[in-house]
Image: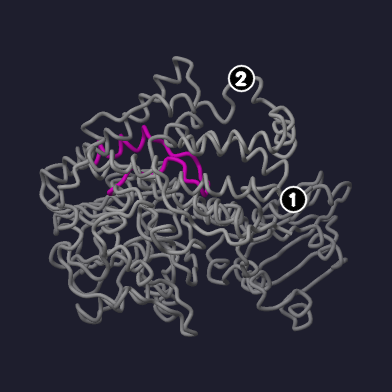
Amino acid sequence: MTETIAGEAPKDASPSVVAQHAAMLDALPFHDTADFDDAARGFIGTVENAHIATAQGRVVWSLEPYSFLAAEDAPPTVNPSLWRQSRLNMQHGLFEVVPRVYQVRGLDIANMTLIEGDSGVIVVDTLTSIEGARAAIELYFRHRGRRSVVAVIFTHTHTDHWGGARGVLDDETLSSGQVPIIVPDMFMEHAVSENIIAGPAMLRRAQYQFGPFLAKGARGQVDCGLGKSMAAGSVALLRPTDLILTTGDRRVIDGVEFEFQMAPNSEAPAEMHFYLPRYKLLNLAENCTHNFHNLLPFRGADVRDALAWSKYLGEALKLWGGKAEAMCGQHHWPVWGRERIDTMIRQQRDLYKFAHDQTIRLMNHGLTASEIAETIRLPKSLEGAWHGRGYYGHIRHNVKAIYQKYLGWYDANPVNLDPLRPVESGKKYVEYMGGADAILERARKDFANGEFRFVAQAVSHLVFAEPGNAAARALLADTFEQLGYAAESATWRNSYLFGAQELRQGMPKAPARPAMPRETLAALRTGQLWDVLGIRLNGPKAEGMRIVLNWKFTDTNETFILNLENCALTYIADTQAEDADASFTLARSTLDEVIAKLTTFPEAVGSGKIGVSGDATRLTELMTLMDEFPRMFEIVEPKRTTVS
């Protein structure tokens, strides 16, 4: 059982943190309020407190808990630069970008962009949740009149940009197939890889990045940089119908011409920008937002290519510089005016290029990732640009991502080639440093001096060696807390404060992981379903086993061999095995129902939905080898269960 620390609650900011905040107030141009004007410009109407709930009354999204951000001055427990960004992200409702182009902002972490054509409306990105997307489009209809959705565009592969699509497309519209769903090339491959294959681990890590279990307040979660947090509603992935393949591709949708630019391996592995000549509007998706973005988010992802990112922004300038009179993205607020737009794109272009080139320069001088993070400094021209501040990404961890992209996790020092696991190394560190009492005595002195980074390192070893040591847990929690209060990056703050909370209170109680929605399953290709099954196979349990199963899907005209051998699950499409242990004939939609737990395999066999020949118990044997992934697992303390 996880230990808790009775009576422990968030503390005040230490004098050293308060001093850091005072220095930042002097260093940055807080007198510049142009962003506040832009964030409010074009406001039409909103939902009170941006409150969205399910039909059963469960809150999906609300800004009411953030009412404390009405205060203009930051409290001592929040970095003043982050406080400024957090207040900007409180703007919510329907906004006009230019006549006939609108955005719903602040009803989710992401934006929904609505472009009016000759007869209907084109929806760009559908937020995270079905409930949020439905509320957003109803807000638009309330002020602009009800009109049909004539197309849906997903700018990239992250869930907060496609998860709510069923909220803007009803069953009848979706089944008609008349509304195109337009995405960048390789969208489905990467959406599945990032959100489903790695989903279980990523969702747990995202709790640290976004802080959903932290109390909202001056000693807790205030923002996540790109917006407030992630919505908590229903999510479903829809299969695209139209791929944008190359830069220069065009589409005329309901009379509106779109000029597309591909930007793969930038903020997402599949991402695209577009320009609307009719409205002189540029949309750079998530590649030119009002903060320095992540090159490797804490939740985990493929490392993003800073060099390519910079080049895409340079290409956008070449294509549309001096043409666009308004620029909006799928987070934050727009920018107006050709000169301001071009300046922001140039600065963002150079921000990613500087980070890339200087990291590589220092890397080639032999500096390691952590040494580069200590050495690199942004030029004054970029450091003073509000949209270049590290509210979501940060120069200190983005340079480590660039290093990882080129050289990987290993810094070439053999001491780091095969280190002991945290528990074993923690015990040795404690022994070498003279025991728990000696560590705590020294750590408390360093804490008083504001040396929080090293205190965290040292005391973490003690927590992993002695997870039940209440004094160690308390000191590490206090240390994380001060690091969180000092952080300008919202993701750093959330991670530190959530680490402190878990040390004090243990992991939050969370319900079991729900079954994958049937709509999402239907969007996946059958081969992707087999890939998802493969990652659940417990290899050690499958030692020495061989199972061969034939599958024939009557509605998709697909055939597969599913093969377990050498502790790996593989498949071959468009064929059947003569020596299969069993063969199954069914509709692919029936398999979706089984995986979504709407029915069981025996029930489907009994009702005649699945035809079976051979030894059906071999499928049962295969399924007994599958792991169920926990929703929660320890991060700031040792694992309580053994995994093999």
Structural crowding at the residue carrying mark 1, measured as other residues with C-alpha within 10 Å and reported as few (<14), some (14–19) or many (≥20):
many
Residue sitting at x 35%, y 30%: 355
| Label at residue 512 | none
Q: Please say whether residue 298 is one of the residues in the magenta stretch.
A: yes
Sequence-wise first label, 2 or 1: 2
Span of residues in magenta:
290-316
Q: Position of residue 360 (x, y in %)?
A: 41, 23
Task: State the residue position of label 1.
Answer: 569
User: Tag 2, which secondary structure?
Assistant: loop
Residue 19 percent coordinates (x, y): 33, 40
- Residue 114: in magenta span: no
Q: CA distance from mark 2 to mark 1?
A: 36 Å
Mark 2 neighbour class, 10 Å CA radius: few under 14, some 14 to 19, many 20 or more? few
Amino acid carrying mark 1 in the image? Leu
Q: Secondary structure at mark 1?
A: strand
Residue 276 point in image, percent of width and height: 19, 56
Residue 616 lies in quadrant: bottom right
Q: Which residue is mark 2?
A: 413
Classify 92 as above or below 10: below
- Identify which residue, 602 or 1, lies in the foreground: 1
Q: Is residue 120 left or right of residue 237?
A: left
The colour mode here is one colour
Question: On the rendered structure, is 179 left or right of 37?
Answer: right
Type of residue at label 2?
Answer: Asn
Say above or below: 297 vs 381.
below
Q: Residue at 47% across / 19% down in the picture?
A: 367
Q: Is residue 589 left or right of residue 466?
A: left
Residue at the (88%, 66%) spot, across then down: 615
Q: Is residue 69 above or below residue 344?
A: below
Query: Splitting the image into 4 quarters, where does residue 59 fall?
Result: bottom left
Q: Picture coordinates of residue 56 (x, y %)?
A: 49, 85
